[in-house]
Amino acid sequence: MSEENNQTFGIIAQYTKDLSFENIGSTAEIESSQKQPQIDVQLKVNTEKGKEKNVFFVALIIGINAKFDKPLFILELNYTGEFILEGFSDDLIDTILYVECPRLLFPFARSIIANVTSDGGFPPLYLTPINFADLYQQQKESKNQTLQ
């Protein structure tokens, strides 16, 4: 029996852990101008070992500040998934937690952001897809350079 047959990767739950939306400005300024608002998106992936064996929590933390000469809105979202990982090496678990888990969570977080901005009176904000493998590799390289 190969080792692969003993591996388990699954999602137990996913949910909005925290959500904040502040509508500071007005859409009237955007509608009367030809310019696009400046949108700053910050993304962070946090992982945490659960109390139960082989259970991990992965949080996508997304912060968005939109400006158009003055602030328009601030959106902060913590979208979390609870995953089970069994039978993987530590290196592979790290990669799964920082690449595959966020990849599975991102479409749901993206949808929430589009709905919240639309419900807040702005055009829906659709975040561009993120290559979490590239992001993870950049973080690993940055960490290695810091240690040298």
Image (cartoon, helix red, strand yellow):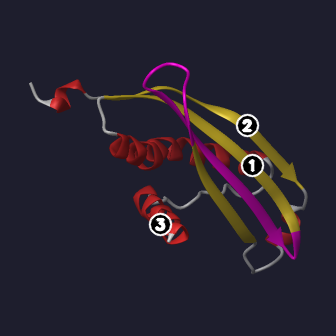
Disc 3 designates what residue? 144
Q: Amino acid at mark 3?
A: Asn
Distance from disc 2 to disc 1, alpha carbons, whole Å, reads: 8 Å
What secondary structure is marked by label 3? helix
**Coordinates of residue 46 in the picture (x, y in percent):** 59, 45
Disc 1 designates what residue? 76
Distance from disc 1 to disc 3, alpha carbons, whole Å, reads: 30 Å
Disc 2 designates what residue? 18
Give whichever of discs 3 and 2 has the lower sequence position. 2
Compared with residue 57, is residue 105 higher up or lower down, i.e. above or below? below
Q: Is residue 56 left or right of residue 122?
A: left
**Coordinates of residue 40 in the picture (x, y in percent):** 71, 67
- Residue 69 on the magenta span: yes
Helix, strand or loop for the magenta stretch, by majority? strand
Q: Amino acid at mark 1?
A: Glu
Residue that extends furthest to the front in the rendered view of this protein: 148
Which region shows up in magenta? Answer: 47-70
Distance from disc 3 to disc 2, alpha carbons, whole Å, reads: 32 Å
